[in-house]
Amino acid sequence: MEEYLKLVKHVLKNGKEKNDRTNTGIISTFGYQMRFNLKEGFPLLTTKKVHLKSIIHELLWFIKGDTNIKYLVDNNIRIWNEWPYKKFQESKDYNNETIKDFIERIKIDDNFAKKYGDLGPVYGKQWRDFNGYDQLKIVIDKIKNNPDSRRLIVSSWNASEIDKMALPPCHMMYQFYVNEGKLSLQLYQRSADIFLGVPFNIASYALLLMLVAKVTNLEPYEFVHTLGDTHIYKNHLDQVNTQLKRNPRELPEIIIKDRKKIDDFIFSDFTLKNYNPHPKIKAKVAV
């Protein structure tokens, strides 16, 4: 994953200090691109341990068109918890519950989960119901029937619904490309949190590429990651510098069971092999 470490070095060298929505402060640059050939291994960061279980469950959640954290909470995935909890804290029902209390209630109380666990029309809603259009199904059909199309695009940026979302989509648009029986995917990410977010995004969209390749009988080839506002939060500087002192290790392999339809994949279909990362590095998410 030298590509990722080059990104970190680029931002540290060329970035400028800026304020941000969370008031944490960032070191930011604009415009960067990485390329990952999946023949060289699955692009899961090795300079720190990345929680693949969270990535797989989140991707399956997107594919389901789900926008409520209950599915994630039921599978002990915590990556989206802070946003609905913050909304709950602002409600008249809040009575000094901790986030742990909040999540436990999401697990056991379906009505509470329905009321306070929904994030609004975020990624899954837009992928599967963008103003009535199932974009993911449509693009898979186009890949099968018109692979040379330059319109193999899925957008999560629905301007008419942004103000209804807990968080506007950061990884906002992706496009497929077919050539000589090989499938590639390019993601445009408007806002890229280099330490916490980007390693997840790389692995998630590489997985999505592999799943779509499965159901279209194509070979997964290249994931291209294009970044807009590319930044390191100031409270992550120690963590990224720790990573820069570590040598990348050999990339792992991921094996995925064959399925005919994109909706058919389940968590047990994925097997990660030969993942030998450096230890995990903790950091606080900016909300």
Image (cartoon, helix red, strand yellow):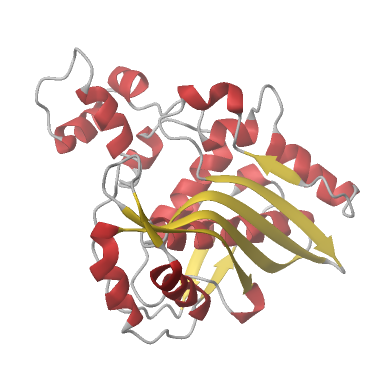
- Which residue corresponds to the image point at 38% horizontal and 70% vertical from the top-left? 12
The vertical placement of 152 against 135, above or below, is below
Q: As rendered, which of 12 and 216 lies closer to the eye?
A: 12
Where 130 falls versus 91 (above or below)? Answer: below
Q: Position of residue 285 (x, y in %)?
A: 29, 50
Q: Position of residue 77 (x, y in %)?
A: 33, 47
- Classify residue 120 by image quadrant: top left
Q: Looking at the image, which residue sits at the far top? A: 92
User: Is residue 182 among the parts visible in the rendering?
Assistant: yes
Q: Residue 141: percent from the left, percent from the top? A: 81, 43
Asked whether residue 258 appears in the rendered view, the answer is: no
Q: What residue lies at 78% left-to-right and 63% top-to-bottom?
A: 218
Position of residue 19 in the picture relative to residue 126 (left or right): left
Query: In the picture, residue 213 is in which quadrant?
Result: bottom right
- Residue at image location 40% in from the left, 77% down from the top: 46
Q: Quadrant of the C terminus?
A: top left
Q: Please tell me which residue lies in front, 68 or 5.
A: 5
Looking at the image, is 66 positioned above or below residue 204? Answer: above
Q: Position of residue 276 (x, y in %)?
A: 38, 81
Q: At x 20% / y 34%, what residue is drawn?
A: 104
Instruction: Give the left or right position of residue 221, taking residue 60 as reference.
Output: right
Q: Nearer the viewer, residue 161 or 72?
A: 161
Image quadrant in which you'd find residue 160? top right
Numbered-mark total: 0
**In the image, is residue 163 above or below residue 8?**
above
Q: Nearer the viewer, residue 267 or 237?
A: 237
